[in-house]
Image: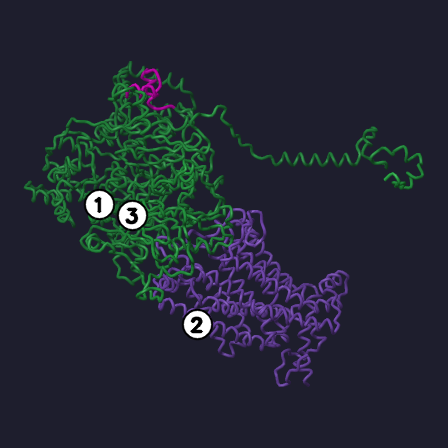
Amino acid sequence: MKDNKKTYWKGIEQLSNDPEFVKHADKEFPEFLPINQNDEGEGSSRRDFLKMMGFGIAAVSLAACEAPIRKAIPYVNKPVDVDPGVPNYYASTYASGGDYCSIVVKTREGRPIKIEGNKLSKISQGGTNAQVEASVLSLYDNERLRGPKAGTENTDWSTIDKEVITKLGAIAAQGGQIRIVSNTILSPTTKNVIEEFKAKYPNTEHVTYDAISASGMLKANEASFGVKALPSYDFSKADVIVSFAADFLGTWISPVEFTKQYSKTRKLGDGKKTMSRHYQFESNLSLTGSNADYRTPIKPSEEGKAVAALYNAIASKTGGSSVGGAGKFDHIDKAAADLLKAKGKSIVVSGSNNAGIQTLVNGINAMLANYGATIDLNKSANYRQGDDESMDKFVADLKGGRVAGVIFLNCNPVYNHKAGADIKAGLSKVSLKVSTSDRPDETAILADYTAPDHHFLESWNDAEPKKGSYSLSQPTITPIFKTRQAQESLMRWAGVEGDYYTYLRNYWKQNMAFSGSFDTFWDQTLYSGVLEVASEEEVASLEFAGDVNAAASQATSVKGGELELAIYQKVGIGDGSQANNPWLQEMPDPVSKSTWDNYLTVSQAWANANGVTAFEGKSNMATLTAGGVSVELPILIQPGQAPGTVGVALGYGRTSAGKVANGRGKDVFPLLGYTGAVTVAKSDELYQIAQTQTHQTYMGRETVVQESILSKYQKNPKAGRYEPMVSSWAEEGGKTNSGNLSLWEGHKYKNHHWGMVIDMNSCTGCSACHVACQSENNIPVVGRQEVINRRDMHWIRIDRYYSSDAQPGDLEAMEVAAANPEVTFQPMMCQHCNNAPCETVCPVAATTHSTEGLNQMTYNRCIGTRYCANNCPYKVRRFNWFKYHDNSQFEDVNTAMNNDLGKMVLNPDVTVRSRGVMEKCSLCIQRIQYGKLEAKKENRRPKDGEIDIACASACPADAIMFGDMNDKDSRISKLLKIKDTEKADYIIEKEIGEPRAYHVLEEIGVKPNVTYLTKIRNKEEA
Amino acid sequence: MQVTSTVREALVTGNKTVHDVTEDICRQVEGKPTKSWMLGMAVSLAALGIGAYAVLTLLWQGIGVWGLNKTVGWAWDITNFVWWVGIGHAGTLISAILLLFRQKWRMSINRAAEAMTIFAVICAAMFPALHMGRLWLGFYWALPLPNTFGSLWVNFNSPLLWDVFAISTYFTVSLVFWYIGLIPDFASIRDRAKNKISKAVYGALSFGWDGAAKTWSRYESVALILAGLATPLVLSVHTIVSMDFATSVIPGWHTTIFPPYFVAGAIFSGFAMVLTLMLVTRKVFKLEDYITINHIELMNIVIIITGSIVGIAYITEFFIAWYSGVEAEQYAFINRAFGPYWWAYATMMTCNVISPQLFWVKSIRTNIAATFILSIVVNIGMWFERFVIIVTSLHRDFLPSSWAMFYPTFYDVGVYLFTFGLFFTAFLLFAKFFPVINMAEVKSIIKSSSLKEKK
């Protein structure tokens, strides 16, 4: 390289070395550039201007599109048992008035998001109902009070305590009367607090009432057996059940418990070819009535006469004397004969609040030797303690101005008592009115002070639903607002020191029998949530001592009329205490399938006679007048409505419950207990009730509903099955089920094969699964108008079909339900077809088949063509027509997705779907994945039953079963008797051996992974 | 030029010379817009404006502004889609198939018919796009493009995907075919243009057409090749559209008769729409000598034939439903005729099956007013046919619990109106600025067919 003498010149300037070039030669840019002009103090240059302008525009535009700040505050010290992403479960107790359910609360990151049944409870046995499932949303209700109030002004606890104590002291000093008004209190410790309060203010009386009173039953039991309590029923031991207007599966006393028991008697299988027979005598078609084998529509005034008739029929065979006033009704003699055959294995119940009717019922049960067998008075139930007479006296005292101070302990009598208007008027004469309501409800807005109670999920408490059965409530979240437990408020005002938690523990320490350390006992009880204490004392004599003749005259003297009113509760809304819960408002009534409203149920005959039109839920308005009170209601034609009766549900027409409930439907509490004639005047104004199902019959389609009767089933377990066969060269014998023919190769499931079985015989239609699914899967509530537009979003629905009297083939007549129809409930959700019609039509492969048999939906990929929904033969796919979250259009109905408080209920494992995508049942894929991962961590396979999905776990009737069909030992495999098949060339390689099992729409060959079991009715003839 | 027997009736009347043809057609392009044109444009733009409001609301709020529900997931959207696609069939049929069959009468109507095809297909394409829940993703996710989602592919099993291909191919071929045909005429206008802008614009549009014999020869070859390509497309597009329904499981959709039945229906409605438009254009632009009664009669005969095919298809469906013994299928058809939507079915039957039969009467099929009315009646009928197929099949399918009604909202109507606005705006612009009749081709039949020459 040394020899290389070549020189390269940058340019002619370098070669010539001219002085101007040499001067700048060491600079990077030898030529003049205007960059540094500014340094020379000549002001801004063009470039500077551009730079400044560019920065300015960028800065201004960035400032203009400032993103909303959402503060996420990390734990400074992580709580020991809270791990992000890992749920914690706490046993607790749901108690609303006397409604009771033992529950397990699922919390994520310190907030309760789901309520499950507590399987350790002997009472609710792991079942729940819609109201229990929905109560978690009530915790996050934006309408709850943020702190104590004096009148309408916000105040603080020390002020309110000081003022209330001063006023109570003043009242006590003047000898004024103080009343604590409450619904049934199940908690013994709370009652003790009330006792302490009464000790401090001796002029205090505790008045208990129930929105739906069972006072008549308490009185009857006292008269009959000397026990003023409700008995424990055990429907599971009953072969024959007769119910007079007691909706024990839906709303009466303790429906979860009763459904658990009842469903055991409705199961059929290899080992069990018998089932209970259920008679129902009622006016409205209730949930219970729709499950009955024989249902007789009667008028409310006829109930006593029907009970008396049954009494006489039984008495005549058991040597008793008959009573007067009996009427003649269908199926009474048949029921009597069946009851007599099943002595000691039957139950007769009545939902009446008439002590005479209840005494007759007691007499019937006594004649049938049911006491001690299916009905236990020694283990008395505390569900209803309300005493109508003491409440009536309280109302009279109020009106008379004889009450100086009143504390409404978590109750709302201005709304939910028939004398609400009188109470409202009387309250103006009371000098101190305190409410512990969680919201400014109809009663609380009249109070001088509102001392809002915690939600039960924020509280410590105990409950004694039945004698010797205890359960504990524990907080699952730090109180969200500055609320205070009502018991603690009473303690403060009574001058009792300490907090309620310590008080509760001390009470238990002193009153409960335990061995060893109390802390251990307490922790164990808290862990399991329930405690059973054996009681050996016999309090009730089994001798029936009621005066049946007096009872019969009381029972049968109820005056009727040409048209009578039967007031009932809806399964979702009940007495209206949770009316501001949109999940319950939008839960379709199991029988009428209507939402967001109450209405006047009338029979088809009445509608025809009065020229009422009805199409797609749109019908006339009518004015109901009873005892001088008029209510305007929309009409709903209800098959099964007893002729000469109309029905209306309670729990609606709230005026001060919150945005969700206010103005929904009409309040009929003032009519509660009214007997006698009513008038209904139809108007020409039309109103549409939001129904999720408007077609009532199944049009004789045996491929949808397959049913039979017990005697046929006993002869042939395949009774009622519909197996459409077509000719085929491929099969021996030339015939095959058309569903077996397929172009598809099918799937091989090497690992799991998830499946579901629905027993239509056990399903009562109670809709607990509905709300459980909504809560688990973040399903939006869409509101009344959108339900009318047929856009409800529920992933699981319960199809309710009425039977029709029409001849097969007369299609028009088949659309009309029978006057007193048989009812079938069919839970329907994604069937997870193996040959899914939705999967093939999606242009972007957003819905696909998993390796475990699930039809899965990829929301991210969905472009919303809705072809999948059109092509779904089961119509279970749901489209996000609008953006349901953070949208002012749905603010008032979809509270779980439209305010920061409500959003706390959302399940973080499930995406909140965006506008324009399709969604549907995923078989709770998040639960399956969680269960699989838990098992994997322990290096094992998931055990059967370990993974349970929301609907199945909520079901109080155990009608829904989920499991792995590849696992030969799983419950589902055993129930379906799954066998390997020879036909290895086609999918699933399995054959279902259970004769009752069928797939809905089997013949179209979509091969669902959800299997149904036929409905069998225990009737003599179909 | 082919030789045409002198005994054949002249296709162009009124003793037109070749120059007359140029004058007659170019007059519209070169002159000022007429009052009736301005009025038509104002109405079209008003419809477009109202429709645009509906479309924007739809995009902003969601598909929920339509009347669809959980049971009826498609209604006006896909009805309109199929209807517009059907209308879009006539143009290509006339220009391609009739070209192959050497039907010279097509020459004076094919330009406008093709334009109509293109605008109709654009209108049709609006609906698959607008009916998507997430248009902002759907418009490209439905295409098999390479992507970064782990190379997520489209689902080739889905008839909707076939639609994407079928419609886009048809649109492309139709557009090219139409445009190629326009080139010589653009050149004529260019050559006559008096101002610079026209000269420049039509010069650009005519792609430097020089009118050389070689150019003409290439032009004819390309036209023939494109005709050959377009012919199967006429059949395939509606076949594939029909498969949106035929491959599903829904009773009333799951039918093998759909492909031929849909194609016949498409030609039926397409011809009707061509007639509607041509009768107006003919009158307004005074083209009675080019679009003669003979044309109208021939087109009416096509309408009788296709209308009868459609009628037979309706009856066959009923027969097969009964013969199949399938309960849901039988119910679907009984429900069509006697269920809550009986009026839609009755409208369809009256308009599609009964009314075209009037064309058996010569005086009716050569009467312009009658033809005009019946051509609209046919398109009303064909709209109802799609509505009946889509809505009445969906609203009561397998499970009675899900049976529901469909009620349209303002936005259903509004989006339909939007496509009308779009269609007529585009067609009016076409009629004003493009030669509505293929001058070059018509001139080729002047010699053999014009009365003047025969003298």
**Residue kind at label 2, given as amino acid type:** Ile
Quadrant location of residue A365?
A: top left
The amino acid sitting under disc 3 is: Leu
Foreground pick, A98 / B28: A98
Q: Which residue is mark 3?
A: A975
Instruction: Look at chain B in the picture and name its colour.
Output: purple
Query: Is the same chain shared between marks 3 and 2?
Result: no
The reply to whether the magenta stretch includes residue A496 is yes
Residue at mark 1: A282
Q: Tell me the green chain.
A: A
In the rendered view, would you say A983 is above or below A83?
Answer: below
Rounded to the nearest angstrom, the CA distance separating label 2 from label 1 is: 55 Å
Left or right, A160 with reference to B52: left
In the rendered image, which quarter contains the N terminus of chain B? Answer: bottom right
Say left or right for A743 vs B184: left
Counting residues from the start of the chain, the first of labels 1 and 3 encountered is 1
